[in-house]
Image (cartoon, grey):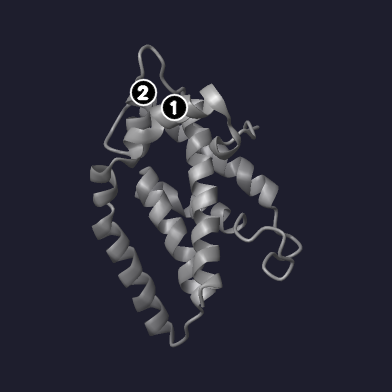
Amino acid sequence: RPDRTIIAFMDGRAHNRLRRLTSKGFAPGRLDGLEQPVRSITDRLLAETSAAGRFDLAEDVALQLPREVLVEFLGVPHDERADLLDWSRLIVNLGDPEYHPGDATPGAAFENIYGYLVSLARRREAEPCDDLFSVLLSARFHDDRLTPVEVAHFATTVMNAGMETVYSSITAGV
């Protein structure tokens, strides 16, 4: 079960430690590398809505775009994204009975996302590559470093907060 402490609610040393150890993952060079994937994802989503002959901004863009960009940013392997994208759909817009059918299980979706991200962080610790998990796992400050569980927890927070923030910003802005 994931620790429910997130960076936004941390104070003092714990907050500063996490910021210090995660900042490399958000360096301008890493973020610049997302420009082309974001363009490709956006182009594909718009092409799909055009081909379908209908357009629902909330469903087709506000929901899809942040989910897909975030799994790209995290470095989730392409062949492992389907379940993560399905689970992530269940945790956007929580509390809205019109959005979530009665059989939706957001709690289980949170647990599935977290479990997958812990597994991915442990794999990246054993076999680093050029992704956010590997960057965060290799970050050091003096002798301190993040554990795979801490990286997974941080990634879960980034994913959940990022999806909800972008979804709400797009839908509220129209």
Q: Residue at x 56, y 39 (%)?
A: 8
Q: Is residue 123 visible?
A: no
State the residue in front, 170 or 53: 170
Helix, strand or loop status at disc 2: helix
> What is the tally of numbered marks visible in this picture?
2
Q: Residue at x 39, y 56 (%)?
A: 69
148 to 113, vertically: above or below: above
Contact between marks 2 and 1 (CB within 8 A): the answer is: yes
Residue 107 location in percent, x, y?
69, 47
Q: Is residue 103 left or right of residue 73?
A: right
Label 1 belongs to which residue? Answer: 122
Q: Residue at x 28, y 64 (%)?
A: 40
Residue 131 location in percent, x, y?
31, 39
State the residue in front, 105 or 163: 163
170 to 33, vertically: above or below: below
Q: Is residue 44 left or right of residue 118?
A: left
What's the amino acid at mark 1?
Arg
Label 2 belongs to which residue? Answer: 126
Question: Within 10 Å of the Cα at label 2, are there few (<14), some (14-19), or many (20+) other Cα atoms?
Answer: few
Q: Is residue 11 visible?
A: yes
32 to 4, vertically: above or below: below
Residue 57 location in percent, x, y?
49, 76
Residue 152 location in percent, x, y?
49, 34
